Image (cartoon, rainbow, N blue to C red):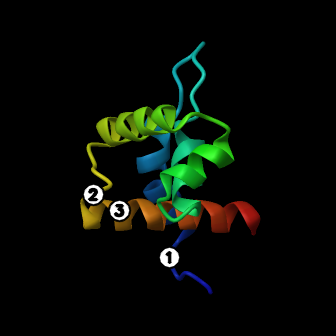
Amino acid sequence: MSIRQPAEDLNAFMAEVFEPLQPAKGQTGGLEETLMTYMACGGSAVQAAAALHIHINTLYQRIHKIEEILGMSLSNQEHLLHLQLVCYLKQTYRSS
């Protein structure tokens, strides 16, 4: 599948989600990886926690932090679709 959007537009769309999730200097993050893994697991917290080798409560804490930082809720269908799309684009462009 080919997306007919300028690369600059797609990069800006992805940056809007992923840049705020980057860890501050001297901190470990994992929020971007957590979001990508959670989406790749179809929203299954159990599968995502196992894939990330973390306790499920840690996953829930990270998801809550992601929602807080982005001002989005994974229970809101529009927000969920937005995040699914941005994760799909990031995965697609990473592997291209």
Is the residue under label 2 in contact with that under label 3 (CB below 8 Å)? yes
How dense is the environment of label 3, judged by Cα within 10 Å: few (below 14), some, or many (20 and up)?
some
The amino acid type, in three-letter code, at marker 2 is Ser
Q: Position of residue 63 (x, y in %)?
A: 41, 41
**Which residue occupies the extreme top position in the image?**
26
The amino acid type, in three-letter code, at marker 3 is Leu
Circle nearer the viewer, 3 or 2: 2
Q: Give 86 or 49, whichever is nearer the viewer.
A: 49
**Which residue occupies the extreme bottom position in the image?**
1
Q: Which residue is drawn at the image coordinates 61% and 35% (left, top)?
A: 54
The quarter in which the N terminus is drawn is bottom right
Kind of element beneath mark 2: loop
Q: Counting residues from the N terminus, which is met first, the one under dot 3 or under dot 2? A: 2
Q: Which mark is residue 80?
A: 3
Report the Cα–Cα distance between label 2 and label 1: 28 Å
Q: Which residue is drawn at the image coordinates 24% and 60% (left, top)?
A: 76
Q: Give 12 or 53, whichever is nearer the viewer.
A: 53
Q: Position of residue 39 (x, y in %)?
A: 52, 59
The amino acid type, in three-letter code, at marker 1 is Gln
Taking 14 as reference, is 88 above or below it?
below
Q: Position of residue 87 (x, y in %)?
A: 53, 60
Taking 4 as reference, is 88 above or below it?
above
Q: Look at the image and tell me whether residue 3 can be seen.
A: yes
Q: Counting residues from the N terminus, which is met first, the one under dot 1 or under dot 3? A: 1
Is the residue under label 1 in contact with that under label 2 (CB below 8 Å)? no
Q: Which residue is labeled 2 in the image?
A: 75
Q: Look at the image and tell me whether residue 8 can be seen.
A: no
Q: Which mark is residue 5?
A: 1
Report the Cα–Cα distance between label 1 and label 3: 21 Å
Q: Position of residue 75 (x, y in %)?
A: 27, 57
Count of number-bearing discs: 3
